[in-house]
Amino acid sequence: MAKLCVQLEDIRAAAGRISKHAHRTPVLQSVSINRILGAELFFKCENFQKVGAFKFRGALNAIACLSEEKLKRGVATHSSGNHAAALARAAKLAGSNAHIVMPSNASTVKKAAVEGYGATITYCEPTLEARESTLNQILAREGRSLIHPYNDPRIIAGQGTAALELLEEVKDLEVVMAPVGGGGLLSGTSIAVSETLPSASVIGAEPLNADDAYRSMQSGEIEPSHSPQTLADGLLTSLGDLTFAIIKELCAGIVTVSEESIIEAMRLVWERMKIVIEPSAAVPVAALLEKRGEIPGNRVGVILSGGNVDLERLPWAR
Amino acid sequence: MAKLCVQLEDIRAAAGRISKHAHRTPVLQSVSINRILGAELFFKCENFQKVGAFKFRGALNAIACLSEEKLKRGVATHSSGNHAAALARAAKLAGSNAHIVMPSNASTVKKAAVEGYGATITYCEPTLEARESTLNQILAREGRSLIHPYNDPRIIAGQGTAALELLEEVKDLEVVMAPVGGGGLLSGTSIAVSETLPSASVIGAEPLNADDAYRSMQSGEIEPSHSPQTLADGLLTSLGDLTFAIIKELCAGIVTVSEESIIEAMRLVWERMKIVIEPSAAVPVAALLEKRGEIPGNRVGVILSGGNVDLERLPWAR
């Protein structure tokens, strides 16, 4: 087995770097959801993280790893969502600045958040090609450091700190679940869990409509999704080579879920726990609702990845 | 000054009685809401209380004060909302049972909650007269104990425990705010605050469309609202003689707010704090948004009274 690009010590180092600015989010339980799902669930509430998502952890760690010189030149990325806001805010905190390539159809709320953190935005056509070529021009012209949303060891290590905190707080978990899009959260979680609690399984949860991780695990090769359509807008991206190498090695499986289950799970958490989570965060809960039999164990940690929702357009109100 | 019907020692006794079954709810802060409102706010999150509202505290205390004989005979009340569910659940926990008179137009969600806790429901026309006469028939026929939703010293003492916990956790508050409908929460809060932190002011917040407490404070007499229409469906009731006597004596003032401010405040809390609160709970936040100048002091405790919302019918989605 080749050495993975991120080790437990990297996650521990990231935890130290981000501790000043990131929230140590609470772990919540719900008696009624436990009853409904027939399991004891422990929800790590990254919807309460700054910028409303775990993405702040990775962005903060990546920025903290830059030299003074690089901070002066600034950072850049392309993102339509939480990574954009996270990187903009983390850069601002470090006295640096971010240039974000956003697709022209990104939501007004998300554009405003990124602007609010003082980042420069360049809009482009909403295709991966346009995003990458626009970003490459900016990188070449401005000499900024690229901070990729997930396929970056500093990002993976940062995202792994959420699971590290969960395992510190809750003992004897049998399973830890996280959603999977590009795989930054799931790969970081896999390393944190496998090295601190090897008896526990890590299981990824993914929309059936964006099931690249499931298919990649089956074939052993990265099988990208092309223009996937899912409510879970944080999970549209496909695995990268770094995240896939870790997930293939350490993750016990990927469970796919229907759009209906995502809506049902999201609503269940809102109604029973009185907290706001985004569709992507509901995906592991949807897996427990839809495919309880495929998920072994009774004590289950679930990383609720974020809470950024357009309150005007809730899926059950359509 | 006449001796009030509830004293601090009653609230302390209630705190002891309910500690086994009620949650000690968290106190949350939001940096961005503090910035928007120009104050340091401490939110006592009763939306996380069992049955999703502070009402569980009073119901639990009232039930705990009953003799074995009375528990056997059961309890009764009329309520379309949170008190019904709270009493049903508290009765069940004590091995007793509740008979609830509900208006025929009560929401399906609330009917289901009350039924789920094993209570008997009798439906009646949605008028106060029909509710009271139906309840009186049940009380006469079944020999049950009436547990009034707010005009009852046991209920007032129970509701006061939320403020007691808030003051234990947060020091040097200058203001404590609570919404006011029938006045159980506001009167209990007034006693807890005035006797443990006399330097702090207690301020009630009320929809302008259901402003009986404001008018009653002006005239010195109870001035009921007749068929008020407000989104804050927990605040439709008018003050009772017991709650008014306390509020008149101890509460520094009542601030009224528009329906638009209630929606704006509710949305602000959902978006910035990622928690679900009901319109009634947003009313004190609306007061801070709309009439900051009328509310002195910088360190403000706010009791977020509940989180029971019909997710199909959010006010901003109309």
Image: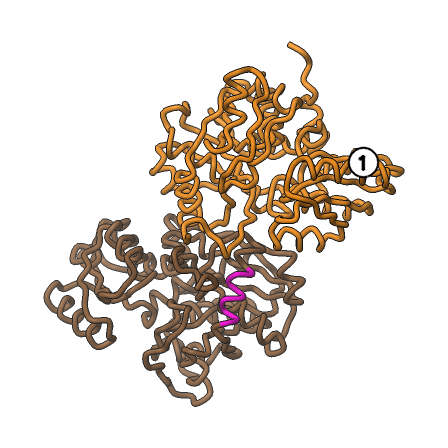
Chain colours: A orange, B brown
Give the chain letter at badge 1: A
- Label 1 is placed on what type of residue? Ser
- Per the picture, the main secondary structure of the magenta-coloured stretch is helix
Local secondary structure at mark 1: strand
Q: Position of residue B26 (x, y in %)?
A: 51, 52
Residue B288 falls left or right of residue B48: right
Q: Is residue B247 visible?
A: yes
First to last magenta residue range: B260-268
Residue A93 falls left or right of residue B231: right
Q: In the orientation shown, which residue stands out farthest toward the bottom?
A: B219
In what quadrant of the picture does the N terminus of chain A appear?
top right
Question: What is the tally of numbered marks visible in this picture?
Answer: 1
Residue pictured at 53% horizontal, 53% vertical:
A310
Q: Position of residue B166 (x, y in %)?
A: 53, 59
Nearest the viewer among A204 and A193 is A204
Q: Which of the 4 image quarters holds residue A190? A: top right
Dot 1 corresponds to which residue?
A145
Q: Is residue B91 magenta?
A: no
Q: Is residue B13 visible?
A: no
Q: Position of residue B159 (x, y in %)?
A: 41, 63
Q: Is residue B107 above or below residue A247?
A: below
